[in-house]
Amino acid sequence: MKFYGRTLHLLARFAPGATSFRPFVHRLRGVQIGKDVFIGDEVYLENEYPERVEIHDGVQISVRATILAHTRGPGRVVLEKNAYIGPHALVVTSEGKVLRVGEGAVVGAGCVITKDVESHTFVMGEFGKAIAEVRLPLSRADRLEDFIKGLAPLKGRSTRD
């Protein structure tokens, strides 16, 4: 069974079909995937415990992002509705923990995410520091400029160090 899952994982990483074939293959592996999900080229979605990854409707995962639901045992990763995971981002949790990327949250390119990301928050930098409130999720914006115009300074919300 592991061989089957790993073969499907490899196929999903490199096959075309970011909104159709890739999500379909990951569902076959056991990843819980909602509707209208985009999975970019070479995305690595949890290989050992695919059933521990939950991707809600409208999520976009950009090129070469990595989602891991385990370190020394299974945890759980939940990408909530309309979240966006940027290129080369790493989202990883440890045994027994649930890591959530909140609804409409945006994880910038190259971030390492090991703690929850609040809904409608834009995080960037090496360890995903919260820098702005997201008023228009990047996964729903027609243009990058529209997303950028929709960012607002954080008011009364905690920022990560």
Image: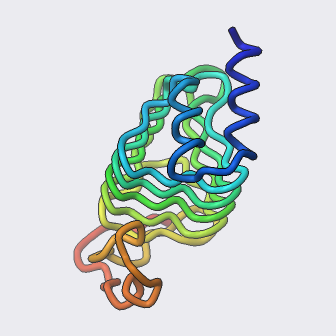
How did the renderer colour the structure? rainbow
Name which quarter of the figure residue 4 lies in.
top right
Q: Nearer the viewer, residue 139 or 49?
A: 139
Q: Nearer the viewer, residue 57 or 95?
A: 57
Q: Specify the quadrant that holds the N terminus.
A: top right
Residue 145 image point, x, y percent? 44, 90
Counting labels gives: 0
Q: Nearer the viewer, residue 145 or 20?
A: 20
**Residue in the picture at 40% in, 58% down:** 83
Q: Tell me if residue 70 comes above or below residue 123 in the rendering.
A: above
Residue 55 image point, x, y percent? 42, 41
Considering every residue shown, the one lying at the far top of the view is 1
Look at the image and tell me whether residue 90 can be seen: yes
Q: Nearer the viewer, residue 21 or 119?
A: 21
Name which quarter of the figure residue 29 lies in.
top right
Q: Tell me if residue 138 comes above or below residue 152 in the rendering.
A: above
Q: Name the side, left or right, on which 28 lies relative to 34.
A: right
Q: Tell me if residue 70 comes above or below residue 68 in the rendering.
A: above
Considering every residue shown, the one lying at the far left of the view is 156
Residue 94 image point, x, y percent? 56, 31
**Residue in the picture at 47% in, 48% down:** 115
**Residue in the picture at 31% in, 56% down:** 103
Q: Name the side, left or right, on which 137 lies relative to 69.
A: left
**Residue in the picture at 60% in, 50% down:** 17
Look at the image and tell me whether residue 75 can be seen: no
Residue 57 image point, x, y percent? 34, 48
